[in-house]
Image: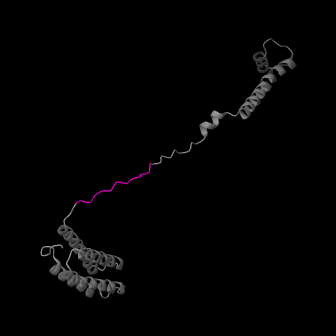
């Protein structure tokens, strides 16, 4: 006997009224077989057709590189014209600021690297200052440059900072003497 549910399924899948149960069961199976067949056919078509748009959609494009054009002829910028007296004053102020920094580093027990750097910069600015002086003044300045080099050597040997007060006094004495002998107010560049 057919239940109500089976009859409704039979009516739904068959175009005609089928009274036989075997025919009704084959009508129910046909849509399932057709669904399976068409789904396999769809998968087969997708796998072997390539689906280029699908793969293009999910692949990352390489980043575009923007290269700057190389400068073939660099421009040369002219330095502003500064008089020799002004250059002398600048180097003297640079030396004075580095000497003050050295004295401050010796006073506050900063690292040896900082102290040595300050002594190097002060020496460099004194050497630049030397080019603006006449021969007699250059010889006087050479004595101070040599004593500043000796102070730098003393700082390098004093790794623990036990001679910090002595080195500070030497740096202050150098500053006083150089300020007295090479102050730009009383010097004219040669």
The image position of residue 116, as x and y in percent, is 33, 79
Tell me which segment is drawn in magenta: 69-80
The image position of residue 167, as x and y in percent, is 27, 85
Vertical comparison of 23 with 69: above or below: above
Looking at the image, which residue is at 33% across and 56% down? 76
Between 108 and 144, the one nearer to me in the picture: 144
Vertical comparison of 20 with 186: above or below: above
The image position of residue 68, as x and y in percent, is 45, 48
Between 43 and 147, the one nearer to me in the picture: 147
| Image quarter in which the C terminus is found | bottom left
Question: Which SS does the magenta portion mostly show?
Answer: loop
Looking at the image, which residue is at 84% across and 21% down? 26
Q: In the figure, residue 180 lies in which quadrant?
A: bottom left
Between 128 and 12, the one nearer to me in the picture: 128
Q: In the figure, residue 3 lies in which quadrant?
A: top right
The image position of residue 22, as x and y in percent, is 87, 20
Question: Does residue 48 appear left or right of residue 100 in this picture?
Answer: right
Looking at the image, which residue is at 35% across and 80% down? 112
Question: Does residue 37 appear left or right of residue 101 in this picture?
Answer: right
The residue at the far top in this view is 16
Vertical comparison of 81 with 132: above or below: above
Magenta stretch: includes residue 25? no
């Amino acid at each position: 006997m057919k239940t109500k549910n089976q009859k409704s399924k039979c009516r739904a899948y068959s175009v005609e009224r089928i009274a036989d149960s075997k025919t009704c069961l084959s009508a129910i199976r046909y849509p399932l077989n057709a669904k399976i067949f068409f789904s396999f056919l769809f998968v087969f078509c997708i796998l072997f057709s390539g689906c280029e748009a699908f793969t293009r959609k999910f692949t990352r494009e390489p980043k575009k590189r923007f290269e700057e054009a190389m400068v073939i002829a660099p421009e040369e910028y002219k330095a502003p014209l500064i008089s020799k007296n002004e250059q002398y004053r600048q180097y003297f102020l640079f030396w004075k600021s580095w000497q003050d920094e050295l004295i401050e580093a010796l006073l506050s027990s900063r690292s040896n690297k900082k102290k040595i750097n300050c002594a190097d910069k002060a020496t460099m600015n004194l050497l630049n200052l030397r080019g603006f002086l006449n021969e007699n003044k250059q010889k006087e300045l050479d004595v101070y440059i040599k004593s500043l080099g000796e102070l730098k050597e003393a700082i390098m040997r004093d790794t623990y900072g036990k001679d910090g007060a002595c080195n500070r006094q030497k740096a202050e004495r150098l500053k006083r003497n150089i300020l007295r002998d090479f102050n730009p107010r009383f010097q004219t560049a040669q």
